[in-house]
Amino acid sequence: MWSLLDGSTELDSIVIDVKDYSGRIGYVVDDLRFKDTLIDSTGSAQNRIPNIEQFIGKLHEKGIYVIGRVAVFQDPYATMVHPEWAVTDIRTGKPWKDAGGAYWLDPDSRDAWNYIAAIAKQAYAVGFDEVNFDYVRFPSDGAISDAVFAKTASTTKAEVIKDFFSYLHDELSPLGIPISVDLFGQTTSETNDMGIGQIIENTFPYFDFVDPMVYPSHYIDGFDGYAKPALHPYEIVKYSMGTAVTRAIAASSTPSKLRPWLQAFDLGAVYTPAMVDAQKQATYDVGLDSWLLWNAGAVYSKAEVMEGAATATSTAR
């Protein structure tokens, strides 16, 4: 990691999991100034990253901007401790799980909202420069018809998620905490909520950065006329982010909030450094100057992040 953040590459930021897909927080806070009773009573903290404040301090010494990622509603841990916060299975009355076996916090649970806000405030207090929210959506797979949500029948999923966006802004922005949100890549071109509650226009008033995950491999075959979208990284990213820019302007927002997640993993094609660079170039060509790279194994080659023809604020996770 350190060799990629030594000034010889485009990278000037890093994303670190605060709360990951397991629902566990990756560090234990010992300083009484930063302790939180809701987090402590839930017991979600694990000492995966010892001395988190010192670790972030070392990154800051190198001029690195440190983003803390919070996986929001997918949370197998908190749903077991607080089943009253969970999406419920209509058949059993117990927490519902998706096709992959993961449990979800109910997106309309105010107690869950308070818990997420507490995690974000603590992360900022220990030194993270920005808090990034992922899995801010309703579940998308599994026996959705068996899932019972707290929202009323007259309330849409998009309204629930928008209300949560507004809540985060009201809780965190007055404290000076920069916040960002990850979205499905298809939100750039789809105008409905795709059944998960995400509509890109609903993010612009509330976040400092909006991060669509425009991985070409995740688009269906035939998208925008390409039989295999993964084989066309420049075209897919340019189309998706160009559409997002247009929608941001139409919503009277600034396109500079847009910061796409780009593909740095093999799926649908072997992603060479040239294919990663093509996505970056597509981002620049629609007028944006920042991006993030995603590889599930956190394995990045220096060739993928070497200085290109344009200057960018960029991040690897």
Image: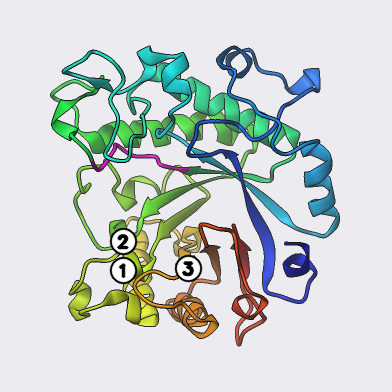
In this picture the colour scheme is rainbow
Q: Secondary structure at mark 1?
A: helix
Residue at numbered disc 1: 243
User: Which kind of residue does numbered mark 2 sit on?
Assistant: Thr
Residue at numbered disc 3: 265
Residue furthest to the front in view is 101
Q: Quadrant of the C terminus?
A: bottom right
Q: CA distance from mark 2 to mark 3?
A: 21 Å
Q: Residue at x 61, y 62 (%)?
A: 315
Residue 255 % position (x, y)? 44, 63
Which circle marks residue 188 in the picture?
2
Residue stretch rendered in magenta on the structure? 134-141
Residue 50 in magenta stretch: no
Q: Residue at x 63, y 29 (%)?
A: 121
* Contact between labelled residues 2 and 1, with CB atoms less than 8 Å apart: yes
Q: Main secondary structure of the magenta part?
A: loop
